[in-house]
Image (cartoon, grey):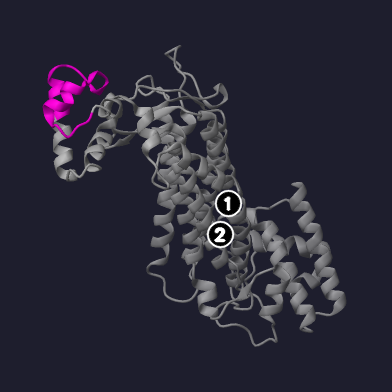
Amino acid sequence: MTLWGGRFSEGPDAAAWAFTTDDSDRRLLGDDVAGSVGHVSMLAEAGLLSAEEAAQLLSGLETIGDEWSSGEFVFVDGDEDVHSAVERRLGELVGDVAGKLHTGRSRNDQVCVDLRLYLRRAAAERSGQLAGLVAALAGAARRAGDVIIPSYTHLQQAQAIPLAHHLLAYAWMLKRDIDRFEGAAARVDVSPLGAGAAAGSSLPLDPAATARHLGFVSVFANSLDAVSSRDFVAEYAFCCAQAMTHLSRLGEDLVLWATEEFGFADYGDAFTTGSSALPQKRNPDVAELARGKAAGVIGDVATLLTLQKGLPLAYNRDLQEDKRAVFHADDVLAGALTAVTGMVESLTASAGAVSPWVTALDLAEALTGRGVPFREAHHLVGTLVKRLTADDRTFADVTEDDLAGVDPRFEPSDVEVAASPAASVARRTVAGGASWDSVEQQLRDLET
């Protein structure tokens, strides 16, 4: 069924029909029914439908909604899109009065309301999933206890930190992702119904009433903008892409940590896979796929931005392509969050190899605390490292004589400064730094 045809003397060519139809919008059926219920309620209040007509339409829409929820709704080959499928089925249920459903409405504002209803709900679901992963990271941080690992810059060991501090860095990234979804949801929460095809309607519609029925917080201010803009779709996809980028970075660390070279973590069998050739292998495929699938979601953002860039106002059929991209981004993120959360919940921490050089900055700061200019202190510690390296020794072997031989401003207590990564962690007292107290404060903040 199409929602047009009076102007045409023949139906569409089979190839043209196949090219112009897209069944990706079928997932919007529940939202299309909800939008139609709100629209019918407004039409009745505005006197554009009789009470009997409205009751018939609402009863039929309720039946369609029930069929959708139970998985019994059947699409047919002639359904041009989800809107025509609903109207076709409504006609089967209530007869000719179904033709009044589209009063004062266009598919242009109809698809926008469907998308906004869908994305408003999806944003809340993704925020909930992200919160679940934040909780999983906090739980893994607590389980990590006093495990110390090196932090890295340029993938070279830098300073000693609690593994918990590293895990919590991702928790804070994901908290910002939640904020982004909540902000995007606020901009999605605008009803476009009443904008019609482009310029509104001569009928006495009440867009504010429709918005109330559908739970929208505001109504469109410009009908052209309402039906032609897809910035809210691109923004939602960006939220997905940024969250997937964070999952990709987390996945990279989870992959590295599981190697024998790093040895900081292990994961449950349920979240690893084996090798077809190498019997000893346990591969962190969940993390690798989170990393790999981020590429496609980033591409979805580019698709949605490019889709909009050359379109004149108002609606153009190009915009049909927005749904496939945003649904893909949303689906990938939803699946990745579920899998990665399970993987993090299965994480078992262990202490890997921490370089003895991770206390170098502590030594420089010890000198700086005694009034030595930092640049000079940096040079002196570098000189000490050079001498020890030449003798095939490390900070674990440093003596008072080694320190005095470089500069008399070193003190005997600096032997302990150089030799203890654990003491280094305890000294990182800057708020938000990598001390145990900071980790505990972060956990309290995240768990409230």
Q: Main secondary structure of the magenta part?
A: helix
Q: Is residue 356 above or below residue 78?
A: above
Q: Position of residue 365 (x, y in %)?
A: 25, 40
- Disc assigned to residue 176: none
- Mark 1 or 2 closer to N-term? 1
- Disc assigned to residue 182: 2
Residue at x 12% of width, y 20% of height = 390
Q: Is residue 197 above or below residue 326?
A: below
Q: Is residue 121 above or below residue 292?
A: below
Q: Which sits in the foreground, 98 or 255?
A: 255
Disc 2 packing (10 Å; few <14; some 14–19; many ≥20): some
Residue at x 49% of width, y 48% of height = 174
Relative to 419, 447 lies left or right:
right
Picture quadrant of residue 384: top left
Residue at x 69% of width, y 68% of height = 215
Q: Which sits in the foreground, 15 or 413?
A: 413
Q: Position of residue 273 (x, y in %)?
A: 50, 22
Q: Position of residue 177 (x, y in %)?
A: 49, 52
Residue 80 shows in this picture: no
Label 1 SS: helix
Q: Quadrant of the N terminus?
A: bottom right
Label 2 SS: helix
Residues under labels 1 and 2: Cα distance? 7 Å
Proximity of marks 1 and 2: CB atoms separated by less than 8 Å: yes
Residue interval drawn in magenta:
384-411
Q: Is 314 included in the stretch rendered in magenta?
A: no
Residue 310 shows in this picture: yes
Q: What residue occupies the far right of the structure in this picture?
A: 52
Residue type, mark 2 in image:
Glu
Disc 1 packing (10 Å; few <14; some 14–19; many ≥20): some
Circle 1 sits on which residue? 127
